[in-house]
Amino acid sequence: MSSDEPTSTVQDTAVSSSPAARGETARAVDGEPPILRVEGLTKYFQVGGGLRPKQLRALNDVSFTLRRGEVISLVGESGSGKSTVLKMLSRLEQPTSGRILFKGRDLLAEEPRSASLSYRGQVQMIFQDPFGSLNPVHTVAYHLERPLVRHRKATTPEELRRKVLELLHTVGLNPPEEFAAKHPHQMSGGQRQRVAIARALAVDPDVILADEPISMLDVSIRMGVLNLMDELKRSRGIGYLYVTHDIASARYIGDRTIVMYAGHMVEGGSSEELLDSPAHPYTKLLLEAVPDPRGNIFRELPAKSGAPQLVDPPPGCPFAPRCPEVMDVCRRESPRPVQLRRRDPGAPERFVRCHLYEEDQAPPVGEALGEA
């Protein structure tokens, strides 16, 4: 058994042992300006040919802010648009419209090539596949040396070697001298993902974009990677945008959770409050698929099957064709975001895009928890 295998799973500890439940809140300060601000981010892809090409609407008017030392979990099914958000923020794709402001700078207004190296030195990405993101030909030391040299974080061979060993020690790969000489195939999935995290840390980033970093790992070692990410958040003040389809891990590590469906943000707020009292029917359905270790049972909501229509979608709410609580207005008008009343006045703002709710309405705690 590798050293990064804990004795419990995310699902077992997501409620009682999450950083928020332990009182280990993020180092984010409400008074300080956000380090990352996304405004109206939209991405359409052109599909088909001929005289009338169609548009696939991958993202629609996505807006949020991220502060230093804060974790935002983006949750949703495949095709919800959460990974597309990361591609926009990592500049692998250009958005159709919207703004991305990093430390007050409008990234999309700058020349991409001249701004790219500086930005990527401050915003790093951890990919889903820990093996595919590492070159099997090269050693671990090589993978860590490249960003250090590229971003001029080391000037001599001695300093380069010292920083490589420090990075491996930071992510719990000990003895670092031994792991530095290994190739990716000689390590477990959890160890490879720790190398990917070490590579991201090499340039001292302010923000890490994590695209389902534990989804390809064994359940038994997921907790070790999440705990490492949480420790780096608290010790270095790193902000994370954590993409996942796993509600349990989103709650465990996220200070805030944003639920996405068909490219739309349908609900958002404090992870504890949102997942204790979900408002949107889609969020409730996601939670019903997760066994609750506390014994709370959510009311069954039979959803209609089928994937969302992303190419030339019909008017109204994107979830209307599958929603068990659909009304006539849902098929005619797209819901606007509504601010919900917070259980804790100091918690982040809660919003939902659903015609079932009005401004400052309390979330349906009793109904959501099966107490109605």
Image (cartoon, helix red, strand yellow):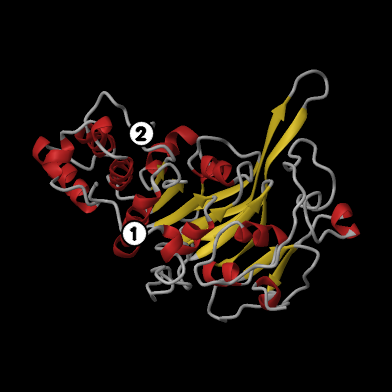
Residue 54 to residue 97: above or below = above
Q: Position of residue 269 (x, y in %)?
A: 58, 67
SS of the residue under disc 2: loop
Q: Quadrant of residue 64?
A: bottom right
**Left or right placement of residue 97 versus residue 29 in this view:** right
**Left or right placement of residue 317 versus residue 13 in this view:** right
Query: Hey, what amino acid is under mark 2?
Result: Phe
* Residue ID for mark 2: 131
Residue 341 to residue 98: above or below = below
Q: Position of residue 296 (x, y in %)?
A: 58, 72
* Residue ID for mark 1: 227
Residue 295 to residue 237: above or below = below
Residue visible at 47% across and 53% down in the picture:
242
Residue visible at 87% across and 60% down in the picture:
327
Q: Position of residue 311 (x, y in %)?
A: 76, 35
Residue found at the very far top of the displayed protein: 50
**111 or 318, which lies in front?**
318
Q: Quadrant of the C terminus?
A: bottom right
**Left or right placement of residue 147 versus residue 103 in this view:** left
**125 or 320, which lies in front?**
320
SS of the residue under disc 1: helix
Label 1 or label 2, whichever comes before in sequence order: 2
Does residue 70 appear in this view? no
Q: Residues within 10 Å of mark 2 (few under 14, many from 20)?
A: some
- Measure the C-alpha gap from mark 1 to mark 2: 21 Å
Query: Hey, what amino acid is under mark 1?
Result: Asn
Q: Residues within 10 Å of mark 1 (few under 14, many from 20)?
A: some
